[in-house]
Image: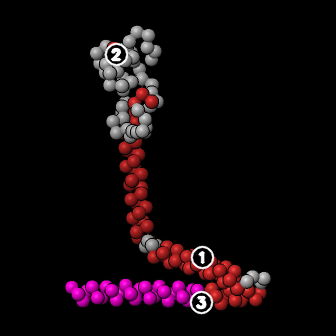
Amino acid sequence: MIKSILIWIVVIAGALIAVAAGAFVVVLLAAGVGALLARLFPFSMFEATLLSLIAALGVVFVIGRVVASALRTPSPASEEDDEEELIDEWEEDEREEDDWEDDDEFPDEPDLFPPMTRWQRPTRRTEFEGVGRNEPCPCGSGKKYKYCHGRPGVTT
């Protein structure tokens, strides 16, 4: 147990030393390039070093992104598998959409207006013909038709 903890401490310390050494090299390189820029252009030594340090950090960032994307490149076999999976998902979505379009009501319809109260939400166009007085109102209010849109004087 203690040996494994010591090994982890040594590994972490080694990684920190490697990062510090890399940062030192980048700063040293920036100082050298800054001195060269200060001689060639009308910059102070500080401005030239700061400019070269920013450029060096940009280069390090780009190199890191290139290396990271190179490590994530899938093999050609997995690209074909991914392509087949995407096609299968697309076909499954198409089948689901066809099934979904056949339904008159959408039971899995997401709540598009969660912060609004029910009376603030946009109303759905609904047919009110053929609704019995004691049946639920088709507008979705939860009230009986006779107390909602079935009252005299209520426009549909």
Q: Give the range drawn in magenta.
A: 1-28
Q: Which of 72 and 47 is in front in this view?
A: 47
Who comes first in sequence, dot 2 or dot 3? Answer: 3
Secondary structure at numbered mark 1 = helix
Q: What element carries label 2?
A: helix
Q: In the image, residue 117 lies at what x, y percent? A: 40, 32
- Disc sitting over residue 28 in the figure: 3
Q: Distance between the residues labelled 3 and 1?
A: 16 Å
Q: Residue 58, which numbered label? A: 1
Q: Which residue is drawn at 29% across and 88% down?
A: 6
Q: Is residue 45 left or right of residue 7?
A: right
Question: Pointers 1 and 2 in contact (CB under 8 A)?
Answer: no
Q: In this view, does 10 lie above or below 135?
A: below
**Amino acid at pointer 3:** Leu
- Residue flagged by tag 1: what amino acid is it? Gly
Give the labeled residue for mark 2: 147
Rendering coords of residue 16 (x, y %): 43, 85
Label 2: how many residues lie within 10 Å, few (<14), some (14-19) or many (20+)? few
Q: Does the magenta stretch include residue 52?
A: no
Q: In which quarter of the image is residue 35?
A: bottom right
